């Protein structure tokens, strides 16, 4: 009986202790739980991503139609140019033929004039020179020469007018050909622009598909974990609060800082959203603070393989990212700790990552929990909250140990 009474007393004390502690729970902790990222937020972001994908699909179809139409315009311009070139060649042949006829008529006219002059001036030997047997025949021959001369002159004027028209036509065709060439170049420039836009769309399309896939994995992970729709996800999986930042690798040299820099290559921007740590390819990469994998982006054209991790440090939310990774060893939603190898560094150009100049690790840090890549996606606010990662030496300096 006494034992039963003792059990009831102990239970009562525990209940009172729990109630007492709940009364004195700081309001900020309760607020942090309700104001954090929730499953509802992830579902909303998934809806936004799918709406964006639909919009991209429509833009892609329109661009494909533009590309097809522009290709047809280029082919038509090239056909017209070939026809204009053939027309110019034919006109040149006609001009050559006409010029030859003009020269021939000129020669005939000169001969007739010479003959006519002889008829008029050498009347003593008239019958001998002309071969006329009678005066009537002589007059007829003289008139015939005049008629032929007049005909030749008329034909000559006709041919000269034809040559003039041919030259005008040649000039007109040449101008038409130049205009077609100008249009063709404009079409080709447009084709290049459309091609670049289409390539970006494809890149964005792949990225957003990866984002949607990642988001679905993330939602499934938290649903399987048992998180409620409006529960703070970090509280749900009980991610511990960190009190300090560590370094992502055991040693390295700082090769680039956060902020403005001279672009090292045409494909690399001047606004740097993190620090670059010079390490050899395949170096073990660790979390800088315990957390949860928020997102993974693979084979981005600028950044390559990217790993985003959510964390709490001194009660504040942060997201940090590693870019240019050779390999990622964790999955979306996985809890990670500072002693765990989560990735291997890369940095070399693997055929898809155009924003790298050599082996290194890009480490970016932002306040708040953000989903997705730091690229063109409107949902990503990562770049807006970038801060300088603490605890690193200056540019060109080495560090040893984490």
Image (tube, rainbow, N blue to C red):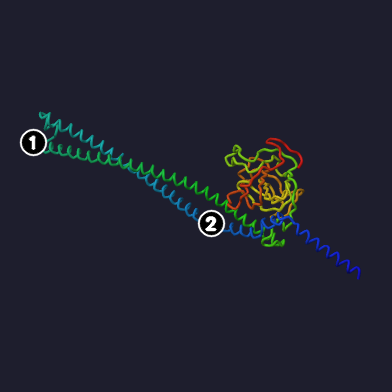
Front: mark 2 or 1: 2
State the residue at coordinates (63%, 43%): 273
Comparing 366 with 192, the one in front is 366
Residue 3 figure quarter: bottom right
> Where is residue 213 shown, x and y percent of the image?
63, 57
Badge 1 crowding class, 10 Å Cα cut-off, few under 14, some 14 to 19, many 20 or more, is few
Per the rendering, the mark at residue 135 is: 1
Vertical comparison of 319 with 42: above or below:
above
Comparing 282 with 14, the one in front is 14
Comparing 100 with 50, the one in front is 50
User: Does residue 162 appear left or right of residue 339 in this picture?
Assistant: left
Vertical comparison of 130 with 11: above or below:
above
> Where is residue 98 shown, x and y percent of the image?
28, 40
Q: CA distance from mark 2 to mark 1?
A: 100 Å
- Farthest right residue in view: 2
State the residue at coordinates (59%, 59%): 47
Mark 2 lies on residue? 55
User: Does residue 131 appear left or right of residue 215 in this picture?
Assistant: left
State the residue at coordinates (48%, 55%): 65
**Considering the numbered disc 1 on the image, is that residue within a helix, a strand or a loop?**
helix
Per the rendering, the mark at residue 146 is: none
Residue 147 figure quarter: top left
Badge 2 crowding class, 10 Å Cα cut-off, few under 14, some 14 to 19, many 20 or more, is few
Q: Are marks 2 and 1 in contact (CB under 8 Å)?
A: no
């Amino acid at each position: 009986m006494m034992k039963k009474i003792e059990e009831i007393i102990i239970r009562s004390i525990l209940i009172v202790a729990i109630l007492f502690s709940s009364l004195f729970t700081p309001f900020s902790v309760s607020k942090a739980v309700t104001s954090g990222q929730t499953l509802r937020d992830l579902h909303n972001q998934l809806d936004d991503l799918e709406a964006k994908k639909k919009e991209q699909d429509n833009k892609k179809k329109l661009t494909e139609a533009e590309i097809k139409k522009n290709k047809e315009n280029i082919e038509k311009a090239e056909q017209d140019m070939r026809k204009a070139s053939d027309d110019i060649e034919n006109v040149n042949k006609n001009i050559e033929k006409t010029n030859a006829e003009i020269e021939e008529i000129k020669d005939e006219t000169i001969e007739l004039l010479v003959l006519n002059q002889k008829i008029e001036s050498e009347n003593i030997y008239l019958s001998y020179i002309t071969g006329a047997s009678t005066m009537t025949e002589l007059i007829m021959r003289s008139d015939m020469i005049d008629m032929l001369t007049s005909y030749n002159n008329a034909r000559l004027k006709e041919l000269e007018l034809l040559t003039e028209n041919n030259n005008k036509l040649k000039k007109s065709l040449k101008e038409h050909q130049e205009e077609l060439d100008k249009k063709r170049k404009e079409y080709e420039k447009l084709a290049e622009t459309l091609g670049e836009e289409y390539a970006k769309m494809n890149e964005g399309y792949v990225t957003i598909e990866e984002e949607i896939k990642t988001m679905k994995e993330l939602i499934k992970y938290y649903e399987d974990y048992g998180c409620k729709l409006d529960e703070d996800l970090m509280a749900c999986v009980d991610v511990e609060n960190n009190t300090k930042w560590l370094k992502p690798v055991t040693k390295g040299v700082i090769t680039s800082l956060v902020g403005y820099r001279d672009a090292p290559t045409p494909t690399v921007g001047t606004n740097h959203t993190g620090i670059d740590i010079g390490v050899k390819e395949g170096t073990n990469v660790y979390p800088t603070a315990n957390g949860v994998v928020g997102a993974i982006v693979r084979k981005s054209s600028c950044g390559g393989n990217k790993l985003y991790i959510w964390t709490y440090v001194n009660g504040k939310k942060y997201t940090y990212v590693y870019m240019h990774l050779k390999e990622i060893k964790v999955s979306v939603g996985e809890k990670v700790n500072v002693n765990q190898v989560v990735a291997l560094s890369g940095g070399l150009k693997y055929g898809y990552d155009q924003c790298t100049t050599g082996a290194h690790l890009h480490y970016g840090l932002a306040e708040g929990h953000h989903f997705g890549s730091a690229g063109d996606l409107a949902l990503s606010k990562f770049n807006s909250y970038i801060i300088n990662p603490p605890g690193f030496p200056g540019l060109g300096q080495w560090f040893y140990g984490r």
